[in-house]
Amino acid sequence: MSVKIKSAKFIKGIIGTNPILKDSKSQIAFVGRSNVGKSTLINSILERKNLVKSSATPGKTRQINFFLVNDAVYFVDLPGYGYAKLSQKTSEKLRKLILWYFTSKEAMPKLVVLIIDAKVGPTELDFQMLDILKQEGYSVLVAANKIDKLKKTEIKAKIEKIKSNFYENLLPVSAKNKQNVDKLRQMIFDFVIHK
Ligand SMILES: Nc1nc2c(ncn2[C@@H]2O[C@H](COP(=O)(O)OP(=O)(O)OP(=O)(O)O)[C@@H](O)[C@H]2O)c(=O)[nH]1
Ligand SMILES: [Mg+2]
């Protein structure tokens, strides 16, 4: 049966240890390079236009934001990594915050959706992120976003290449034109329900 989003609301943004992490509800984490479309993709999955603030200026998400979906699971929007224009101090802070979320054993998301740019392909920082997620033993699903930027004829080859070089469990999507977003939503909820 297909999932319906009955409710989705912002609960809080955290920058360190917090009681919400002890909540029994599962967390689905969304992580990726700054500007890759994490916030836009969450809005598309949740069928909300502006629940999560997305922006043309990268580096805007500075906290780990928790959204409660169907009163059952948290969607967790993390700050992006790798945005060169932030001050050294700010980008180091964000890097540590992301690392803390995945390695402190306080959060332990049930599923991590690692978002990469389908046109750019996986970057060095994406490889590093994937290594950390694997080391920590998380279940990972990679979403290759912005496929609307690729020519129809090049999508297949590009995606196959990313699958073999980077990660097999990958779904090409477009948060902008909603391509495969229903499928991604379904994969996420099937995972939460069955695991
Ligand atoms: N063409 C295209 N643009 C997209 C897509 N998804 C997001 N964008 C655009 O990419 C830019 C960044 O989107 P965000 O959702 O704010 O990206 P983010 O990953 O949350 O960025 P940070 O919070 O800075 O880490 C915005 O201008 C979006 O409109 C997509 O599927 N296709
Ligand atoms: Mg964002």
Image (tube, rainbow, N blue to C red):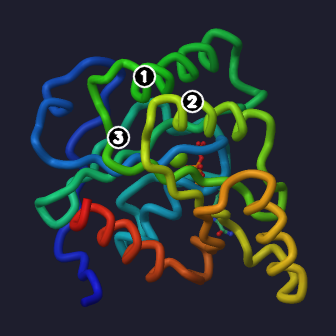
User: What distance separates the C-alpha of mark 2 from that of mark 1?
Assistant: 8 Å
What percent of the width, then of the height, locates residue 54? Answer: 53, 54
What percent of the width, then of the height, locates residue 113? Answer: 49, 53
Where is residue 70, by image quadrant?
bottom left
- For the N terminus, the image quarter is bottom left
Where is residue 120, by image quadrant?
bottom right
Give the numbered dot on residue 103: 1
User: What distance separates the C-alpha of mark 2 from that of mark 3?
Assistant: 21 Å
Where in the image, quadrant-wise, is ligand 1 located? bottom right
How would you rate the neighbour count of disc 2 (Cα within 10 Å): few for under 14, some for 14-19, many for 20 or more? some
Q: Going 80% across and 35% down the picture, which residue do you hit?
A: 124
Residue type highlighted by circle 3: Asn
Mark 3 or mark 1, which has the lower sequence index?
3
Q: Going 21% across and 66% down the picture, which residue do you hit?
A: 193
Residue type highlighted by circle 2: Ile
**Residue at the disc numbered 3:** 65
Residue type highlighted by circle 1: Thr
**Residue at the disc numbered 2:** 132
